Image: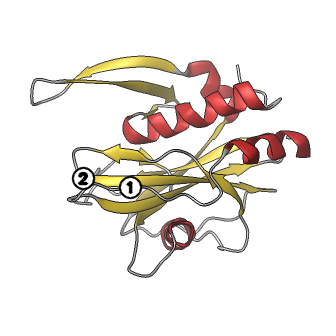
Amino acid sequence: MLHADAIASLAARLESDPRPSPGPDDRLAAVLAPIVLEPEPTLVFTVRGAALSRHAGEISFPGGLQDPGESLEGTALREAHEEIGLDPSLPRVLGALPPVHTFVSGILVVPFVGTLEREPAFSVNEREIDEVLTFGVEQLGAVERAVTYDRPDGGVWQGFAYELDGHTVWGATGWMLHTLLEMMRKETRWPVT
């Protein structure tokens, strides 16, 4: 179980009112990194549908593009509800991590961190999501590794990857996860190796 002081320490490091600065051609999006507290801290991910036009089959946090007039936190909660059936009133949103740019799709993503006391029953939107995954925070910390991948355009991508149960978290989600785990390691008594 994660203690209240660790949650408060993490919340103090997160941005309470993020105001990202997208480039002229960027679109804004938000995701929710749900942390289930009981019986041990775990993070909830989705496997994006294989038929989607962007990032098909990749592992991500639930989320998507911001609608006009919508707050970014509202976007994260709405998308989590649409994708995995998460009741927007359940997560306690602690704040946001720094935004991450997905250069391939030109999207600036603001990741929000929220806690859930227990894992709810998920209802997967099969048009968008193939599967819901949960991984323990300790497990994720133990398998974290820095990686370098060759890009099709001849460039190189450097970041972090997490291989668990035949799945690999990497890319923009890998960066978000690394940032969150680093905050947990440095600012809280969270059980992260």
Residue name at image x 41 percent, y 64 percent: 64
Residue position marked by numbered label 2 in the rendering: 106
| Residue 35, above or below 27 | above
Q: Position of residue 55 (x, y in %)?
A: 29, 50
Mark 2 belongs to which amino acid? Answer: Gly
Across the whole image, how many numbered discs are drawn on residues?
2
Mark 1 belongs to which amino acid? Answer: Ser
Say whether disc 1 or disc 2 marks the residue closer to the N-terminus: 1
The residues bearing labels 1 and 2 have C-alpha atoms spaced at a distance of: 13 Å
User: Callout 1: few (<14), some (14-19), or many (20+) C-alpha neighbours within 10 Å?
Assistant: few
Q: Position of residue 176 (x, y in %)?
A: 50, 40
Residue name at image x 79 percent, y 32 percent: 188
Front-most of 184 and 139? 184
User: Which corner quadrant holds the N terminus?
Assistant: top right
Answer yes or no: is residue 77 visible: yes
| Residue 49, above or below 174 | below
Q: How is the image coloured?
A: secondary structure
Residue position marked by numbered label 1 in the rendering: 21
Front-most of 37 and 14? 14
Q: Is residue 166 left or right of residue 18?
A: left
Q: Secondary structure at mark 2?
A: loop
Residue name at image x 40 percent, y 70 percent: 66
Q: Is residue 47 left or right of residue 92?
A: left
Q: Position of residue 153 (x, y in %)?
A: 9, 30
